[in-house]
Image: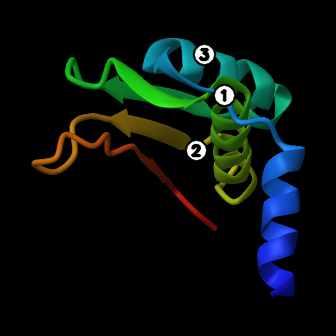
């Protein structure tokens, strides 16, 4: 149907290039991209030793994580703490990132 065609067109418009990415590098790039949105917030990272890499498209993953960080800053009190946690997830070894903050 029409929805399927729209989905295929959207998928073709974005060239997804999955690669194994260092979680540290991805987080650093996302924080840099979020830039001024994080001003006034203390950002604390807790990255478990088992959470060293993810399989994702670098530019899309960076943009998505930067967007999450920007929203965390936008919807939290000024000068509040934003925590980023990443570690091993369930028994299938999926990564389980989380974000905590003092949301408004």
Q: CA distance from mark 1 to mark 2?
A: 35 Å
Tell me: 63 left or right of 53.
right
Crowdedness of circle 1 by 10 Å Cα count: few (<14), some, many (20+)? few
Above or below: residue 56 compared with residue 75: above
Q: Residue furthest bottom?
A: 1
Chosen colour scheme:
rainbow
What residue sits right under mark 2 in the picture?
Answer: 80
Residue 10 at what x, y percent from top left? 85, 58
Q: Residue furthest left?
A: 91
Query: Mark 3 and mark 1 in contact (Cβ < 8 Å)?
Result: no
The label nearer to you, 1 versus 2, is 1
Residue 96 at what x, y percent from top left? 32, 45
Of callouts 1 and 3, the N-terminal one: 1
Question: Residue 93 occupies which quadrant of the picture?
Answer: top left
Residue 9 at what x, y percent from top left? 88, 59
Of callouts 1 and 2, the N-terminal one: 1
Please state which of residues 43 and 55 is positioned toward the viewer in this rendering: 55
Viewport quadrant of the N terminus: bottom right
Please state which of residues 68 and 77 is positioned toward the viewer in this rendering: 68
Tell me: 74 left or right of 52.
right
Q: CA distance from mark 1 to mark 3?
A: 20 Å
Crowdedness of circle 2 by 10 Å Cα count: few (<14), some, many (20+)? some
Q: Residue furthest front?
A: 1
Label drawn at residue 17 = 1
Query: Mark 2 and mark 1 in contact (Cβ < 8 Å)?
Result: no
Disc 1 secondary structure class:
loop
Residue 47 at what x, y percent from top left? 32, 24
Label drawn at residue 28 = 3
Question: Residue drawn 84% across and 28% down?
Answer: 36
Above or below: residue 74 compared with residue 38: below
Of callouts 3 and 2, the N-terminal one: 3
The label nearer to you, 1 versus 3, is 1
């Amino acid at each position: 149907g029409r929805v399927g065609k729209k989905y295929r067109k959207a998928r073709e418009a974005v060239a997804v290039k999955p690669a194994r990415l260092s979680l540290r590098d991805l987080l650093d790039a996302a924080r840099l991209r979020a830039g001024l949105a994080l001003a006034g917030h203390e950002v604390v990272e807790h990255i478990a030793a088992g959470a060293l890499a993810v399989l994702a498209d670098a530019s899309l993953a960076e943009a998505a994580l930067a967007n999450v960080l920007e929203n965390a800053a936008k919807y939290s009190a000024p000068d509040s703490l934003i925590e980023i946690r990443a570690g091993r997830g369930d028994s299938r070894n999926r990564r389980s990132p989380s974000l905590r903050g003092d949301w408004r």
